[in-house]
Image (cartoon, helix red, strand yellow):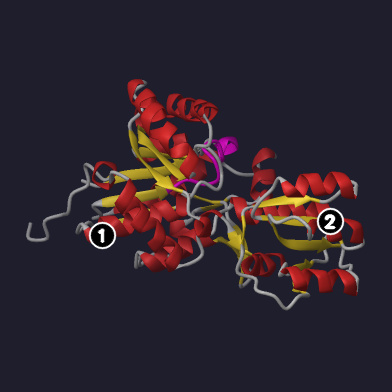
Amino acid sequence: MTKTLLVTSTEEGTGKTAVSVALGLLAQERGLDVGYMKPKGTRLRSRVGKTLDEDPMLARELLDLDAEMHELEPVVYSPTFIEQAIRGQESAEDLHQQITEHFDSLSAGRDLMIIEGGGSLTTGGIVDLTDADVAERLDAEVLLLAGYGQPGDVDDVLAAARHLEDRLSGVLFNAVSDDAFDTLETDVAPFLEGEGVPVFGALPREQDLAGITVADLADELGADVLTDVPTDAYVERFSVGAMGSDAALRHFRRTRDAAVITGGDRSDIQTTALQAPGVECLILTGGHRPSGAVVGKAEEKGVPILVVQTDTLTTIDRAENVVSEGRTRDATTVERMRALLADHADVDEILAGASASDDDD
């Protein structure tokens, strides 16, 4: 009997891919035959003329799966697909059948089938393919991933739990900061348990999983790096330099692990940003190169300067997407998550009900 576990989240960028693949590896260590599927491809890139989601590609490699991409990712949930669905050009019934057929093929003979949700809990609603819909269609238990920074975040967890109803297996908190851990363990977890929501653990926040290096950010944005300084600092958030220099300095001083995005012609903002200790790099938009004085000051401070051709609004959207989508890029990231799960989550309880097949039968 195959156990099917769907990994969803209260919001995007909560670590679904890293947790899904790491759970698969931990299950394989326990002797289970593991399959994987992401019905809705949402983290899309164009490769060799096709638009594909990178997450199933990584899962296929690390879990050593013998499956085609169109099986692992039946629906490419792109902006074009969404527009066509809204216009009635996509048949929800056909999509449901396609997903079910691929699932039946991929899960045959498996002990555990991991289904990775796409986007957030509600992504796919226009074709009746939210994660709750998929769980119902594939008879899956649901593992809910959530962040936690303040007590109000519990509202999102309870709302998701009520939406998922009996399908919910439990919640796993990810990327919890040190200052939020005590409250989560002493107050929040017991409260949720009392509300009928099992808590499988809380994974501590680790910077290299929460952010992206300046070097990787430059690569993702297609930026030119003007400075000869290290680019291994991590960026977790972005600050837009669109105000006066005095207000900007007060703003920049309150942030940390940040990249400042501003026009390449705003030398006043650039100079001000270089005075703030929490600014890890400058991203200058519009293809404008800064003055030699700004470049010299940046190199003196050890702050990289990236120049992009796109306008400021486009750059903000792209940069925020890069960070919110998570940094699941390689085996190293998944291995870090595997270790976090092993140390801080009740993996045996998450995988409960999945047992290795008896090959001698």
Q: Up-down: is 198 above or below 271?
A: above
Question: Residue 336 or 109: which is nearer the viewer?
Answer: 336
- Image location (x, y in percent) of residue 346: 28, 43
Q: Is any atom of residue 266 visible in this view?
A: no
CA separation in Å, label 1 and label 2: 52 Å
User: Mark 1 or mark 2, which has the lower sequence index?
Assistant: 1
The local secondary structure at tag 1 comes to: helix
- Image location (x, y in percent) of residue 301: 74, 68
- Image location (x, y in percent) of residue 272: 84, 56
Q: Kindly identify which residue carries mark 2.
A: 272
Q: Residues within 10 Å of mark 2 (few under 14, many from 20)?
A: some
In percent of the image, x 41 and y 35: which residue is there? 182
In reply to whether residue 118 is colored magenta, the answer given is yes
Q: Kindly identify which residue carries mark 1.
A: 28
Q: Is any atom of residue 66 visible in this view?
A: yes
Outermost residue to the top: 195
The residue range painted magenta reads: 116-127
